[in-house]
Amino acid sequence: MIRSAAVAALAALLVSACSSGEKADTSNPTAGLDSEILAWRTAVEAEHPACASKVEGKGCQDFQVMCKAYQEIDAAEKAKGVVTQVVAAMTFAGRNPDGSTGKSGSSFMLFSKDANGWTRTESKPVNMSSCAPLA
C-alpha cells in the first residue's frame, strides 16, 4: 500500500512538473521569452536577405542564439509599464539553391515585457559573447 501511494505521488509530481508551462511562472521575469525568440527566428527566416533562397521551404539553417542579457529600463520605459528588457543576438546561415551552406547572417533584437506580454524591436549590434553594446 505504501509503495503504490509513493508511486502515485511521484507520478503526480512528474505530471505537474511536465505540465507547468513557461508562462505559468509569474515570478520569472523572462517567462514567455523562449516563444518570442522562436517567433523572431520565424521572422528572420521569412524576411532576412540571407534567407531569400529557399531549399525545401527553408531559407536558413544553423540558427543559434549567441547571447541574451538583461537591459536597464529607463524612466520613460518604466512609465510605459515595461518590467523586463532583454537584448539577444542570433546567428544563422543561408542556403544556396543546391542546398549547400550560403551566406552567414546575424540579427539583434530588444525584447520588452509589460503587462500585455512581450514586444520586440531591432537592436543595434552587440558583442556576440556578452551582448554588451559595441563601442
Image (spheres, rainbow, N blue to C red):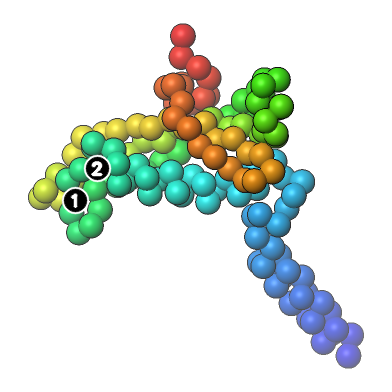
45 relative to 87 in the view: left or right:
left
Residue type pointed to by label 1: Lys
- Residue depicted at 44% across the width and 21% down the height: 124
Residue at image position (66%, 54%) is 23
Mark 1 closeness class: few <14, some 14–19, many ≥20 residues within 10 Å: some
- Rendered location of residue 75, percent (x, y): 70, 20
Q: Is residue 93 visible?
A: no
* Outermost residue toward the right in this view: 2
Q: Is residue 10 left or right of residue 117?
A: right
**Residue type, numbered disc 2:** Cys
**Front in this rendered view, residue 89 or 24:** 24
Residue in the image at 70% along x and 34% along y: 81
Q: Residue furthest front?
A: 80
Residue 7 position, x and y percent, is 78, 81
Q: Nearer the viewer, residue 127 or 78?
A: 78
Residue 128: image tag: none
Viewer-proximal residue, 48 or 58?
48
Query: SS class of the residue under badge 1?
Result: loop
Mark 2 and mark 1 in contact? Answer it, CB < 8 Å.
yes
Pick out the residue farthest to the top: 135
Query: How would you rate the neighbour count of disc 2 (Cα within 10 Å): few for under 14, some for 14-19, many for 20 or more?
Result: many
Residue 119 percent location from the top left of the image: 54, 40
Q: Which residue is mark 1?
A: 54
Q: Position of residue 22 (x, y in %)?
A: 64, 55
Image point 67% across, 67% down: which residue? Answer: 19
Residue beneath label 2, please?
51
Q: Residue furthest bottom?
A: 1
Element marked by disc 2: helix
Between the C-alphas of marks 2 and 1, the distance is 7 Å
The answer to which quarter of the image holds residue 43 is top left
